[in-house]
Amino acid sequence: MIIAGIYPFNEGEKIIIQKHPHILKEIQEIIDSIDANSYINKESKEKTMPGKMLYSPINLNIAFKKEFIKHGWNTVRIPCDYPTEYYTEKYIPKKITGRPFREMDFIKENLGVEIQLGKYAFMVYNVCAKMTIFNKRGYIDAGVEVVPIKTFADKMSTGVSYFEQFVWDLKERGVSNIDIPVLIYGISP
């Protein structure tokens, strides 16, 4: 794969180059090592493109995970202790099953990476909420978000969001005082 687009949110590129130049190079090498064309193995069942062979986001994510793990990156989970004091007296809470958590795909030397080949809301959540939480907890000081560019997203299932849309929204939103430096990479086969 190639890096087809670069957007430095909140001075993400400048900060990451200053603090993590060797790790940034490693991320670029990992992206370069993925042969996206090996993952055109999802047959569409959608009405708009029945039977068409598409890129499989699930299999691409597995390929990225193997490469990041091979290079010593770790997945980190933060357990969530949800507050209950905000329920109204009319509500009787049911016990939450399982242990809720927030997870960052990959962390190494205080740099977080999220690979997002899915729905749009997850891109925004990763950069504007999750990375801020992991920063506040001391796990990361900056982040990299890897997303498909539009022409790549068009060759996946419908509803997959893309770099151009994400960049436009971030530029229109602006930077908040709680945002951390994030480098957005738009990738393409």
Image: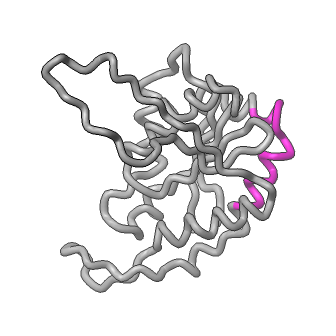
Front position in the image: 36 or 109 = 109
Q: Residue furthest bottom?
A: 51
Q: Quadrant of the C terminus?
A: bottom right
The residue range painted magenta reads 16-30
Instruction: Point out residue 147 in the picture as x, y percentages from the top left corner.
Output: 52, 52
Q: Is residue 144 above or below residue 4?
A: above
Q: Is residue 12 left or right of residue 164?
A: right
Q: Is residue 29 left or right of residue 176?
A: right
Instruction: Point out residue 91 in the picture as x, y percentages from the top left corner.
Output: 17, 26
Dominant secondary structure (helix, strand or loop) of the stretch shown in magenta: helix
Q: Is residue 23 magenta?
A: yes
Q: Quadrant of the N terminus?
A: bottom right
Q: Is residue 27 magenta?
A: yes
Instruction: Point out residue 86 in the picture as x, y percentages from the top left corner.
Output: 29, 17
Q: Residue furthest left?
A: 90
Q: Residue at x 24, y 31 (%)?
A: 93
Q: How is the image coloured?
A: one colour
Front position in the image: 154 or 101 = 101
Q: Is residue 127 left or right of residue 86?
A: right
Instruction: Point out residue 185 in the picture as x, y percentages from the top left corner.
Output: 60, 48
- Count of picture labels: 0
Q: Quadrant of residue 181?
A: top right
Q: Residue at x 42, y 24 (%)?
A: 173
Q: Residue furthest top?
A: 177
Q: Quadrant of residue 62?
A: bottom right
Q: Residue at x 53, y 78 (%)?
A: 39
Front position in the image: 100 or 13 = 100
Q: Is residue 109 above or below residue 46?
A: above
